[in-house]
């Protein structure tokens, strides 16, 4: 019985050690991935092809009425299938870059928010009439 207890104790220690080693390995991998991501970001910033502040600001520039207008435009014209279809969307957002409009539309489509008609409450009565009819 003493041998069985010692064996159980040894097995428990080995399992605990194996679990700790797995956790350490996962942390090292996550750390390496994070480090590689940061290095790629720095390289992109240095090359001038990526600006994290611009990305952050472009997301902030979408207020509730702009998002509601996006839902309304989608309701009226449908989601653009061809390049020319984006012109109708661009008319509703003259101050937005087309790339920002495309990013936000795809983001909202993926999350399902593009089809949430409850968001239309943020539009004024005139705008609602323009996009939704009577």
Image: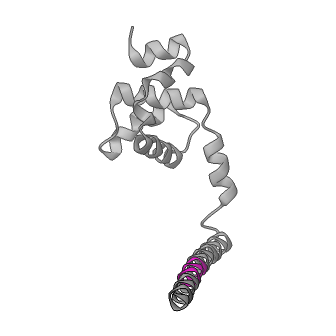
Q: Is residue 100 above or below residue 118?
A: below
The residue at the point 64 percent across, 68 percent down is 48
In the image, residue 104 lies at what x, y percent? 50, 43
Name the main secondary structure of what is drawn in magenta: helix
Between 14 and 70, the one lying in front of the other is 14
Furthest-front residue in view? 1
Between 32 and 52, the one lying in front of the other is 32
Furthest-left residue in view? 81
Q: What's the coloring here?
A: one colour
Between 70 and 1, the one lying in front of the other is 1
The residue at the point 52 percent across, 89 percent down is 7
Per the rendered image, the range of residues in magenta is: 15-24
Furthest-top residue in view? 134
Q: Is residue 51 above or below residue 35?
A: above
In the image, residue 27 lies at what x, y percent? 61, 76
The residue at the point 30 percent across, 45 percent down is 82
Whether 21 is among the magenta residues is yes
The residue at the point 45 percent across, 29 percent down is 71
State left or right for residue 79 relative to residue 127. left
State left or right for residue 119 relative to residue 55. left
State left or right for residue 87 relative to residue 69. left
Q: Is residue 44 above or below residue 111?
A: below
Whether 36 is among the magenta residues is no
In the image, residue 24 lies at what x, y percent? 61, 80
In the image, residue 88 lies at what x, y percent? 40, 33
């Amino acid at each position: 019985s003493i041998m069985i207890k010692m064996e159980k104790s040894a097995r428990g220690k080995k399992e605990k050690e194996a679990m700790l080693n797995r956790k350490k390995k996962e942390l090292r991998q996550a750390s390496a991935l994070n480090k590689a991501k940061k290095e790629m970001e720095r390289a992109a910033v240095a090359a001038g092809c990526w600006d994290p502040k611009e990305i952050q600001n472009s997301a902030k520039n979408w207020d509730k009425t702009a998002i509601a207008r996006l839902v309304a435009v989608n309701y009226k014209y449908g989601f653009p299938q061809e390049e020319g279809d984006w012109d109708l969307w661009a008319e509703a957002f003259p101050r937005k870059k087309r790339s920002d409009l495309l990013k936000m539309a795809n983001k909202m489509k993926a999350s399902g928010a593009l089809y949430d008609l409850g968001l239309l409450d943020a539009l004024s009565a005139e705008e609602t009439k323009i996009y939704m009819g009577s």
